[in-house]
Image (cartoon, grey):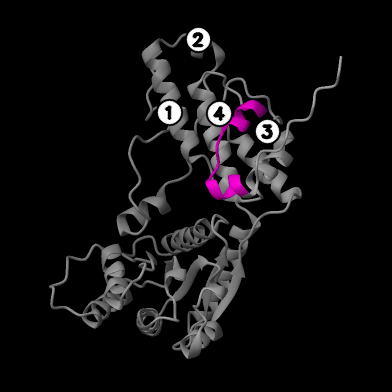
Amino acid sequence: MVVSAPELGIIDDRRAPTTTLAGWRQFVQDDPVTLDLLPAADLTGLDAHNRGEYDDARIKYHSELIVVETSTVRDVIRQGRLLSLLNQREVCARRGLIVSGAAATGKSTAIKQRGRAHELLVHNRYPAADRIPVVYVTAPPKGSPKKLATQFAHFLGMPPFKSRANEMDIATTVCEVLTEARTDLVIVDEIHNVNLATSAGEDLSDHLKYFTEHLPATFVFAGINVESGGLFTGIRGQQIAARCVMTRTGKFPYRDEWRSMVATMEQALRLHRHQPGSLVAQAKYLHQRTGGLISSLSHIVHAAAISAIVDGREQITRDLLDAIAVDHATESAAPKPARPREPAP
């Protein structure tokens, strides 16, 4: 029996960044990868080469796995959809959405899912139209208005502007292109890079405000602890706060939703010896290891699944989970729980 990654449903290529139009469209159009386990009889019939191909396909599958639709993702999609409906006939002072929270709490995932849902809706409604419904950019660190305008131009794949072009030349051209393309949702990630306590931050904020006033679009922002990071400082900050709805992300408590998230990830595993329910049985342990962070949970499950394929054990055990390192911040705040002592014989 001969197997290959394409036959198993795995496309052997790298994803382009979502900060480009091509990368964003790939993200929107690509459905979650699916993969079925081979029956035991077929598995034992594979030679070394084909077994390697099969295992490589499963490793690629587990490196992506699935996006768990958490309550945070649902809330951001719902809030963003409502604001888009409210803004569709507005000519000024459009309402925006700010997603704020600590690092690794799912902000970027949530806003990208909002953008994906919106773009799919528009394409379904206007299948023949040549539109760019969504733009996704990141606020440049220590950025200038010209750098921000260039981020939009880079997303669109516009040719480099001449060195003498200033930020207004770029911004005006970008707004004309996006208006013509019927863009109605603009996502700006890493908004914590805009600090209104600095002159550079004030200039960047003014330029961002120019985009919000010259594009008939709903703006969605996301950043780390935005409310305490200087974005709402002074008159400019008050204008932003008055025009935006705030939704917050955070750690998940050890409740039914956490166990449901673990169960969803377990159902997506493709390991030959994994016992159904054994990962859910470790839900409390996983909560202690990750501090309730969805990003850390995703990492530890993905890494454990790949390790189980590489070392041939084909199941996720407590010993394997203990051996997986999560990010330094989580490891420092949530050290590994002690194993319960074995009863004396």
Across and down, in percent, residue 224 comes to 52, 65
Residue topped by disc 4:
270
Near mark 4 (Cα within 10 A), the count class, few <14, some 14-19 or many ≥20, is many
Across and down, in percent, residue 159 comes to 17, 65
Q: Nearer the viewer, mark 1 or mark 3?
A: 3
Q: Specify the amino acid type for callout 2.
A: Thr
Quarter that holds the N terminus: top left
Q: Specify the amino acid type for callout 4.
A: Arg
Residue topped by disc 2:
44
In this rendering, would 59 be left or right of 242? Answer: left
Element type where label 4 sits in the image: loop
Dots 3, 2 in contact, CB < 8 A: no
Instruction: Give me the C-alpha separation between circle 4 and circle 1.
Output: 11 Å
Instruction: Give me the C-alpha separation between circle 1 and circle 3.
Output: 22 Å
Residue at point 59% right, 58% down? 73
Across and down, in percent, residue 116 comes to 46, 58
Give the mark nearer the N terminus: 3 vs 4: 4
Residue topped by disc 3:
279
Give the mark nearer the N terminus: 4 vs 1: 1
Near mark 1 (Cα within 10 A), the count class, few <14, some 14-19 or many ≥20, is many
Element type where label 2 sits in the image: helix
Element type where label 3 sits in the image: loop
Q: Is residue 313 above or below residue 128?
A: above
Q: Report the disc number at residue 57.
A: 1
Q: Which of marks 3 and 4 is in front?
A: 3
Give the mark nearer the N terminus: 3 vs 2: 2
Q: Give the range drawn in magenta.
A: 316-332
